Structures are given as C-alpha cells and as structure tokens.
Image: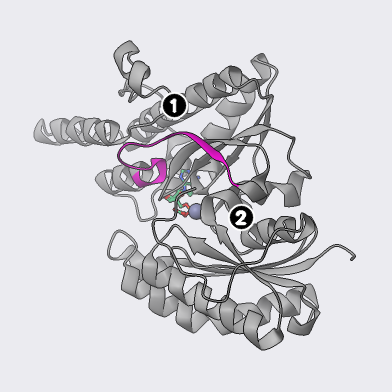
C-alpha cells in the first residue's frame, strides 16, 4: 500500500479539529474553536464545548476534505481522540468517527490525546528517533514522557501534581487583568517586562526532588503571584504587569526546562520534543534551545498551530498505527475522559 491517507478527529476540549495526512505529509488541518464562547466564563464550559463540536463537526470535515483535495471515499482509515478530555466533548468526536468508519467501511483507530501531541511533530520534523523524551505542556496536562514506539504508548516519568502549566498561565493572566486564554497574552506582555521578582520554583527543593523528581507543581507559584499583586494593590501602588508576567513566565519555564533536561540526562536521550499549547511560548522555546545546546541535546517543537489541539495530530498518530499494522479499534470504542497515557 502507498502511504496511508488518514483523517483524524480531535474534540477533547474546545477545538473541533479535523486533519488529513498521507504518511507524514500534512494535507489539511481544519480547526474550529469555541474559545471565544468560553472567554466570558474565564474557562472552558463543557456543555458549551460539546454543543459547539456538534455544530462544527460536519463543516470542519468538509473543509478539511476540500483543502486536501480528497473525498471521504479515498481515505484508508479514520482516527479519533478517545481520551483523555471532557467526556461530552470526546463523545461527539468518537460518535462522528464511528459513523464515518461504519458508513465508509474504513478501519477506526481510537488514539490517546497525549500520544498524538507527540506524534504530530513527525509531520514537521520527520520520524521521531528510536527513543526520545516528550514534554507536554497545555491547559490540561503537564507531563514528562519517555517515548520509544509512539504506537505502543509512552512511559510517564512525571506530571503536575496540581495545576497544569497552561492553567497557571490562564489563572495568572486573570490576576493581571489579561483576557482568556491568558498564555499568549502573558507571552506578549512579558516581552516588554523585566525579570525583577524571584517567584518560587515548585518541587525543586532537595526534599521535594526525592519524591517528585520529574513532577511539577504550579499552584504555589500562582498563589505567590496573586499575593504579590494583592500586596501592591493594598499599598496603593501600581502593579508592574509586564514585570510580573516576565517573572512568572521565567519561573514556569525554568522548572520545565530544568526537569526536562535532567530527565533526558537520566534516560540517556539526546532529543526532547515539546508539545501542547504552552510549547508556543516564546521564552520556553528560547530557554529550552539555549540550555539544551549546552548539553548537546536537540529540541524539537512543532510550529504553534500544531502545538495547540488540532486534528492533524490525531491523523499523524493514526497514520503511524496503520503503517505499523496495529489492530484497529472496535466500533464500540468508548470515549474515556480519564484515559491513562
Ligand atoms: O494544547 P492546548 O491548545 O489545549 C489543551 O489541551 O489544554 O493548550 C491551551 C493552553 C492554554 O492554557 C493557553 O493559555 C496556553 O496553552 N498557551 C500558552 C501560549 N499559547 C497557548 N501559554 C503560554 N504561552 C503561549 N504563547
Ligand atoms: Zn492538548
């Protein structure tokens, strides 16, 4: 068979993503986001997300097919995020993928959302090395993973024990009066700020490292920023928003990069793949590149549009599953909101 033509559907959170790939070549990446509908609530509202997926699904599939110049009948397989994520949101994607698979008589592949955040990098930088480290940082997860064969799953080395990195960005942005989702705004505002405040780096004390070597904690940092801002306001002094943003961002990136590099050294890997929405952060990219170069480690980060949730990442992993002859999922594939990696 020539390289498989695979359509991937992603609906685990607030993005309805439909991607089409042939092998490692990206043909279409259509995304409809309901983020603006959630903005006034300051966070994603599950019911709003599910309804938006329902409305966006068919037009987004049509848009992806038109961009790729293919018809549904040309597809070799359908892949879909089966978890983890918001239960109702996942259900819309899984039901749609089953309908396509059944109606077109094509194999169905349920894929893990985190594994597909890793697989997507192959569309941009080619096959992953035999073994690498992946750091996934988004609004829902912050994990360090050891990746051998992405189609067989990944080995978790550590994860956040409270807030995800993106969640911390979003909450701190709120404290600073910046819109939701806050990550891109903090990134932008911080560019004009200076790192003047030494905010805490969670789980980096010697004692914490014994139990949480590769875990993260961002809730203490978020509280420290909120207290700092409150103290300023109580004193009637202006809040230096750009400096707070830059100092907060530095604290998050410092811990992420430090732990990723230590994990790479411990597991003897020379490549770190960074994915998830926070991987779009300019400081994280620059810091990871420069510190990794000092240690002879290669950093791979997909372009920002492929770091945030999208259908191309699901198609990328689906295509890998087809290429390696993995068994398709049954048509009673469940949506599993707490699916482990
Ligand atoms: O991967 P993603 O689109 O969705 C989840 O699975 O969560 O990630 C969204 C998260 C949000 O928390 C958003 O604030 C954050 O990624 N984000 C950023 C940046 N762009 C998006 N955080 C920091 N800097 C950015 N440039
Ligand atoms: Zn994600």
Q: Secondary structure at mark 2?
A: helix
**Up-down relation of residue 220 to residue 30 (above or below):** above
Magenta-span inclusion, residue 166: yes
Q: Residue furthest bottom?
A: 103
Q: Position of residue 211 (x, y in %)?
A: 34, 21
Quarter of the image for residue 38 reads bottom left
Q: Which residue is mark 1?
A: 214
Q: Which of the two marks, 1 or 2, is nearer to us in this view? A: 1
Left or right, 69 with respect to 248, comes to right
Quarter of the image for residue 159 reads top left
Q: Position of residue 24 (x, y in %)?
A: 79, 55
Q: Nearer the viewer, residue 156 or 34?
A: 156
Dot 1 or dot 2: first in sequence order is: 1
What residue lies at 40% left-to-right and 61% top-to-bottom? 337
Q: Residue furthest left?
A: 234
Q: Nearer the viewer, residue 38 or 178?
A: 38
What residue lies at 44% left-to-right and 73% top-to-bottom? 91
Q: Which residue is mark 2?
A: 305
What residue lies at 67% left-to-right and 56% top-to-bottom? 317
Q: Is mark 1 within 8 Å of ligand 2?
A: no
Residue range highlighted in magenta: 153-167
Q: Is mark 2 within 8 Å of ligand 1?
A: no
Left or right, 283 with respect to 249, comes to right
Q: CA distance from mark 1 to mark 2?
A: 27 Å
**Up-down relation of residue 308 to residue 193 (above or below):** below
């Amino acid at each position: 068979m020539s390289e498989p033509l695979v359509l991937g559907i992603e609906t685990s959170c607030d993005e309805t993503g439909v991607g089409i790939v042939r092998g490692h070549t990206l043909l279409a990446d259509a995304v409809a986001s309901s983020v603006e509908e959630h903005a006034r609530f300051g966070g994603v509202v599950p019911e709003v997300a599910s309804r938006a997926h329902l409305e966006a699904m068919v037009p987004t599939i049509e848009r992806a097919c038109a961009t790729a110049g293919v018809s549904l009948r040309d597809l070799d397989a359908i892949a879909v995020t089966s978890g983890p994520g918001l239960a109702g949101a996942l259900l819309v994607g899984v039901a749609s993928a089953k309908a396509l698979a059944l109606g077109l008589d094509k194999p169905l592949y349920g894929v893990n959302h985190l594994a597909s955040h890793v697989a997507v990098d192959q569309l941009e930088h080619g096959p992953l090395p035999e073994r690498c480290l992946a750091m996934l940082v988004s609004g829902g997860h912050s994990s360090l993973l050891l990746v051998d064969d992405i189609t067989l799953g990944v080995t978790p080395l550590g994860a956040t024990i409270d807030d995800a990195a993106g969640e911390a960005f979003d909450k701190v942005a709120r404290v600073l009066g910046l819109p939701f989702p806050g990550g891109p705004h903090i990134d932008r505002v911080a560019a004009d700020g200076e790192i003047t405040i030494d905010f805490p780096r969670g789980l980096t004390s010697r004692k914490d490292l014994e139990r949480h070597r590769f875990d993260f904690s961002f809730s203490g940092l978020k509280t420290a920023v909120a207290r700092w801002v409150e103290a300023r306001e109580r004193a009637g002094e202006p809040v230096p928003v750009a400096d707070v943003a830059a100092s907060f961002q530095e604290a998050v990136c410092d811990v992420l990069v430090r732990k990723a590099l230590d994990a790479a050294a411990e597991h003897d890997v020379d490549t770190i793949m960074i994915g998830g929405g926070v991987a779009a952060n300019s400081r994280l990219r620059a810091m990871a590149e420069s510190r990794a170069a000092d240690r002879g480690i290669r950093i791979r980060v997909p372009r920002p549009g492929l770091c945030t949730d999208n259908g191309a990442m699901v198609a990328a992993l689906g295509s890998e599953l087809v290429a390696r002859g993995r068994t398709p999922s049954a048509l009673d594939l469940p949506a599993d909101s707490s699916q482990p990696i």
